[in-house]
Structures are given as structure tokens and as C-alpha cells.
Image: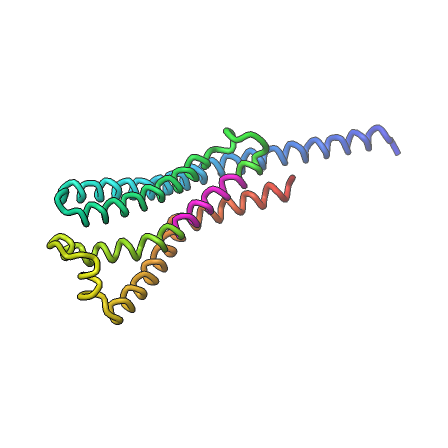
Amino acid sequence: MDINKQWQKLEQANFNQTIKKEEIMKAIQLESTSTIAELKKRLGQKINWVIFFILLFIGVAAFNYTNTLIIALMGVSTLTYLVGYIMLKQEHRKLVSTELIDGTVLDGLKSNLKAIKSALAKERIFGLLGFPVMMIVGFSFNSFLKGSTISDVLESQYNLTTIIFFVALVLFLGFAAEKMNKMAFGEHITKLETQIRELERIS
């Protein structure tokens, strides 16, 4: 047996395996760049809607500057959406290409996955707190415009049937929001998770 030849074959096999591993990592990194860019774009679209509602609330308050209650309600609504904007924007900034993150590609993918999941979780909390307030303001807005107080509106419009309807509507809207998030983000999150598993397998 020629030991030198055997050693050369072994070295060549190790070299080929290293090259193959590097090619797989580059392919995953290239694919992940596209996945992350799409997730960032879709989260950005959500943020744009939040900005739209903030401007809408400010506009409504400006057009009803003589109605103290409307100004107060729009102020609360604006503040609520401003908090939501800040929470989503923080996670949006964390979604960057793995090439721009210190550490390995795997670390970068995990960081991006954590950021997008955190953004959707924060939006879920924001929705649960914001939906009921927004609906009450929306359904009672005409009464507030006519000068009714919150206590007047609660006494005249909100009985047990209305409350049950509101609860059912909040649950429905929550379910619809989850479904829409799954349609918009689910496929890309799954891709990111698959890319992470592939990198962990070859690491």
C-alpha cells in the first residue's frame, strides 16, 4: 500500500468537502439575502400603515380643534400608534443582510429570524390593546362630534348585546390579522428557518 497516495486521496477528499461546504454556505447566504429583503419590505409596509393612521388622527384632531373630547381621543389614538410605530421600527432596523452583521452567516440568520418574530409578536400585543379602543372611538365618533360625553355614549349605546358584539368582533379581527400575517410572512419565515437548519447541519 502506497501511504503517500492514500494520504493525497484523503487530502483531496477533505479539500473537495470543504469546497462543497463553502459553495452551500454561499448559496444559502445569497438566498437568505433575498428572503430578508422581502421580510424587511413587508414589515416596512406595515409601518407605513401605522404612519398613515397617525397622520389621520392628527388631521381629525386638527379639523375638530374646538371639541376637547375629540382632541383627547385622537391624542390617545396617536400616542397608541406612535408606541406601535416605535416598536416595529426597532425590529425593522435589525433586519439586515447577513453580510452586514458581525459574526457568522448562521448568527446573522438567527438574528433576523428573532427580529421578525419579535416584530409580529409586538404587533399582536399592540393589536389586542389597540383594537378595542379604536372600535369604540370609531362606532361612537358621531356622538362625540355632537358633543356627547363618554359616559353619555356608554349609557346610551353600550348594553350587554353591544359588548358581546364587540368581543366577537375583536376576536374575529385578531384571527383575520393572524391569517394575513401568515400569508404575508409565513412562507419567508419558513424559508429562513430552513436556511438556519441547513447551515447548522453543515457547520
Q: Is residue 177 magenta?
A: no
User: 29 or 46, which lies in front?
Assistant: 46
The N terminus lies in quadrant? top right
Q: Residue at x 55, y 33 (%)?
A: 26
- Toward the bottom, the furthest residue is 161
Residue 96 position in % (x across, y down): 46, 34
**Across the whole image, how many numbered discs are drawn on residues?**
0
- Toward the right, the furthest residue is 1
Q: Is residue 169 left or right of residue 157?
A: right
Is the image coloured rainbow, by chain, by secondary structure, or in one colour?
rainbow
- Quadrant of the rendered image containing residue 3: top right
Residue 36 position in % (x across, y down): 45, 38
User: 57 or 175, which lies in front?
Assistant: 57
User: 3 or 174, which lies in front?
Assistant: 174
The C terminus lies in quadrant? top right
The magenta segment is: 110-124
Q: What secondary structure prevails in the magenta region?
A: helix
Q: Is residue 158 left or right of residue 89?
A: left
Residue 108 position in % (x across, y down): 54, 36
Q: Residue at x 32, y 52 (%)?
A: 130
User: 134 or 193, which lies in front?
Assistant: 134
Residue 81 position in % (x across, y down): 31, 45
Q: Residue at x 62, y 43 (%)?
A: 200
Q: Residue at x 38, y 55 (%)?
A: 178
Q: Is residue 82 left or right of residue 69?
A: right
- Toward the left, the furthest residue is 146
- Quadrant of the rendered image containing residue 85: top left
Q: Is residue 121 magenta?
A: yes
